[in-house]
Amino acid sequence: MPYLIAAVALVGALCVLDLILTFGVIRRLRHHTELLNKRGQSSGPSEKVMLDAGEEPGDFVATTNVGEQISKQELVGDTVVGFFTAHCEPCKERVPQYLDHVATLPGGKDRTLAVVIGNDADSLSLAEQLAAGSRVVMERPGGDVVKAFQVTGYPALCVLDGDGRIKASGFKLDEILEKVPA
């Protein structure tokens, strides 16, 4: 009987220790999630999400969701380019703002390009949402358009000038538009 009592006490102590460790892991995961979400919400000068103002994207050719070919040479005038992924909360938050802004652009969809990273059901749904106001290209991570703009994080947004150079870039469209002269 004393062995049984000792075994039950040992198992009970192990369960309590396991529970404490589990709570610690959950707390740490919540902290990491907050840090990742804050990274997507900030756009400090040390965080380079893509090419900077004055730089020119590399050449690329991609196919939009409606089957038309698009290349760097077709991005003329004040073109807004956005890179989004369905598995990023800041991306989901920025999509309505992006769509509201591109709806006001003269030239309509010809002055926009949204690049959706991924090909799962959530990415397809995001692409359909963006297609309401923008030309949409779906790409795998590290695809041609992503490489051309040297995207390192999401969401990544920029405005191109008439020469195909970046006027401003960053995480937040409103901050980018403040940097762009009217």
Image (cartoon, helix red, strand yellow):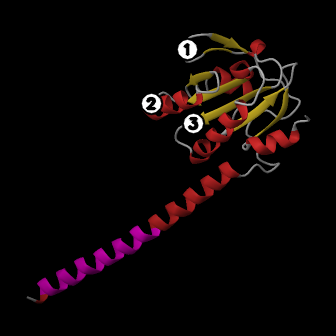
SS under mark 1: loop
Q: Is label 2 or label 1 in front?
A: 1
Name the disc covering residue 85, or none: 3
Pointer 3 or 1: first along the chain: 1
Q: Residue at x 55, y 26 (%)?
A: 140
Position of residue 66 in the picture relative to residue 61 (left or right): left
Closer-to-camera residue (126/6): 126
Q: Is residue 48 above or below residue 111?
A: below
First in sequence: mark 2 vs mark 3 = 3
Query: Where does label 1 land, which residue?
Result: 66
Can you give x and y, in whole percent of width and height, for residue 152 in the image? Answer: 68, 37
Mark with earlier residue (2, 1): 1
Q: Which residue is mark 2?
A: 120
Q: Is residue 30 left or right of residue 121?
A: right
Which amino acid does the dot numbered 2 rest on?
Asp
Type of amino acid at the residue the image marks with label 1:
Val
